[in-house]
Image (cartoon, rainbow, N blue to C red):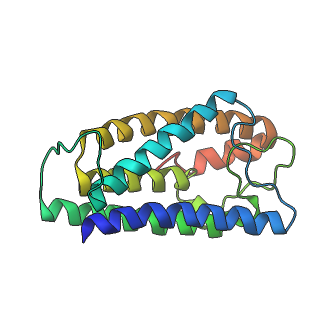
Amino acid sequence: MQRYFGALTIVLLLGMVWVRVLLMRRKGIKAMNFGGIDKKDFLIPPFALFYFYIVFASAFKFPTVSKREFFRSGIVSWVGVLFCVAGLVLFALSLVSFGKSFRVGIDQDHPDKLVTSGIFAFSRNPIYVAFGLVLLGEFLVFSNWILLVYVVAAVWLFHRQVLREEEYLRKHYGQQYSEYCDRVRRYL
């Protein structure tokens, strides 16, 4: 049961992103700006697809690179499911709070207003926190060593992206963003 929920989490997460991007496109807003600043970002999708395959292979017993697990515990798997649910809820709250300001990547050409309300009043980067919760949850559900490597790599990549976004936001919003940083933590 927990393994199926792990796979469903990925589907729901990707579904929420794509639905939001498509809804914004209908309003004339280009929400997909991935790789606009750093072309090396295009190295990420193949690794993401491999991650998705590892999750689905583990859930549905497809052939996989490694079946070696760190542990096998029903209780820990359910804790992982709770992390996945928390990540999905936080991600949904982030999308609602973002409104029409949501973008995948940095949109230097059409920035919107600085979002500081809703879930962004508690964390400057709730979407990255949500992704982190999901990745940690997936590892706890499947306990595959490859997923552990992905958790570590994702934390580094998320932080790298956050620093890039903060640099842009400081330049674009100036004092307003600095005051926001003084009030609200970067992650939690």
Where residue 66 sits, quadrant-wise, is top left
Using the rendered image of the protein, determine whether residue 90 is visible from the camera's viewpoint.
no
Residue 179: image location, x then y, percent: 68, 46
On screen, residue 149 versus residue 114, left or right, reads: left
Q: Residue at x 49, y 44 (%)?
A: 48
Number of marks in the image? 0
Where residue 107 sits, quadrant-wise, is top right
Q: Residue at x 43, y 38 (%)?
A: 155
On screen, residue 2 versus residue 171, left or right, reads: left
On screen, residue 28 versus residue 170, left or right, reads: right
Q: Residue at x 63, y 27 (%)?
A: 40
Residue 19 position (above or below residue 54): below
Q: Relative to the observer, which residue lies in front, 6 or 123?
A: 6
Using the rendered image of the protein, determine whether residue 74 is visible from the camera's viewpoint.
yes
Residue 96 position (above or below residue 67): below
On screen, residue 48 versus residue 168, left or right, reads: left
Residue 126: image location, x then y, percent: 53, 55
Looking at the rendered image, the quarter that the N terminus falls into is: bottom left
Q: Relative to the observer, which residue lies in front, 13 or 64?
A: 64
Residue 75: image location, x then y, percent: 14, 64
Residue 149: image location, x then y, percent: 33, 35
Residue 86 position (above or below residue 186): below
Q: Relative to the observer, which residue lies in front, 81 or 68?
A: 68
| Outermost residue to the front | 63
